[in-house]
Image: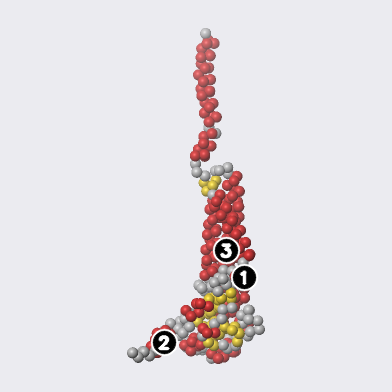
């Protein structure tokens, strides 16, 4: 009798254990089923890779516009290396992201973003290496052009230095090179552009600026690239554009405010050569036509 009671008491326990066993077996399957129903999270490294591509594109745009925006020369030289570094980060982040995505077994997504971060830097590097310096982007100029621009900026500074010490007066136009050498004593190498081998001077003084006196608009042309010579004075007819680019030929121009930029041949006439009021003065000087 006692044996029967003990067996009856043991049966519910065995049944309970039997019912609990499937539940314990189903526990590890629960998270897997939940994971299968969830959308894979996008790899952060893949997103970082794409963001680096956007940043590199922004740096390239700034570099192409740097000549027109009168950026400091030191900053302009840093832009292209900075863009290359950002592209390198995009490539590394894309490779690591792709490896992690494959190893995640479908739990991490963003494969296309990672591939984009890998392919674009490789294609960009290949295109840059295959492009010769003379046919690169419109403002990606060879180092002599950069040196030429640096020279004209320093010469414009020497002219303004002379004017500050002479009550705003320009050096005598026909002797401006000689007077600068005598008075402000710049290095004579500043007068020539590296591409003009053997030339003593590669720049001309804007005759309209020399005639205008002390009050010059900041955007008025002060110095500009011209053919080889010495003490050259003239206007836009003397402007030369020896630096080749994809858009066209460009030359350096320095303004009364001491800034400089590369100017393309088709944009020369749009510069302020005669001062802000030159067009109004010309209109007043014109005689009315007889009817």
- Residue 184's image quarter? bottom right
> What separation in Å lies between label 1 and label 2 (alpha carbons)?
43 Å
Q: Is there any visible trace of residue 116 in the rendered image?
A: yes
Classify mark 3: residues with Cα within 10 Å, few (<14), some (14-19) or many (20+). Answer: many
Asked if disc 3 and disc 2 are in contact, CB closer than 8 Å, the reply is: no
Q: From the viewer's side, name the closer residue of 156 and 101.
A: 101
Q: Identify the mark nearer the N-term, 3 or 2.
A: 3
In this rendered view, identify the residue nearer to me: 276 or 25.
276
Are the residues tagged 1 and 2 within 8 Å (C-beta)? no
Could you say whether the residue bearing mark 1 is in a helix, strand or loop? helix
Tell whether 166 sits left or right of 135. Answer: left
Toward the right, the furthest residue is 198
Q: Which mark is residue 9?
A: none
Dot 1, crowdedness within 10 Å: few (<14), some or many (≥20)? some
Give the camera-side residue of 189 and 62.
62
Q: Position of residue 24 (x, y in %)?
A: 54, 29
Indicate which disc residue 133 carries.
Answer: 1
Residue beneath disc 3: 83
- Where in the figure is residue 150, as x and y percent of width and height? 58, 77
């Amino acid at each position: 009798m006692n044996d029967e009671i003990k067996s009856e008491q043991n049966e519910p326990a065995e049944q309970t254990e039997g019912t609990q066993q499937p539940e314990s077996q189903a526990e590890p399957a629960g998270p897997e089923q939940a994971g299968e129903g969830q959308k894979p999270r996008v790899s952060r490294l893949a997103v970082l890779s794409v963001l680096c591509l956007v940043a590199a594109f922004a740096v390239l745009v700034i570099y192409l516009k740097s000549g027109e925006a009168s950026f400091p020369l030191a900053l302009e030289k840093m832009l292209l290396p900075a863009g290359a570094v950002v592209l390198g980060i995009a490539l590394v982040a894309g490779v690591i992201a792709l490896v992690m995505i494959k190893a995640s077994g479908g739990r991490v997504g963003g494969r296309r973003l990672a591939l984009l971060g890998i392919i674009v830097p490789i294609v960009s590097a290949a295109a840059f290496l295959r492009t010769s310096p003379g046919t690169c982007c419109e403002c990606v100029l060879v180092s002599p052009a950069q040196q030429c621009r640096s020279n004209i900026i320093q010469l414009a500074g020497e002219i303004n230095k002379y004017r500050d010490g002479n009550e705003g007066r320009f050096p005598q136009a026909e002797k401006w090179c000689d007077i600068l050498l005598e008075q402000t004593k710049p290095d004579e190498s500043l007068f020539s552009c590296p591409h003009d081998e053997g030339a003593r001077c590669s720049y001309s003084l804007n005759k309209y600026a020399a005639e205008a006196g002390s009050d010059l608009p900041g955007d008025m042309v002060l110095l500009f690239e011209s053919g080889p010579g010495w003490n050259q004075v003239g206007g836009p007819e003397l402007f030369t554009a020896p630096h080749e680019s994809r858009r066209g030929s460009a030359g350096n121009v320095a303004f009364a405010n001491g800034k400089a930029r590369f100017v393309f041949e088709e944009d020369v006439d749009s510069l302020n050569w005669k001062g802000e009021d030159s067009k109004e003065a010309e209109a007043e000087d014109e005689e009315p036509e007889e009817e």
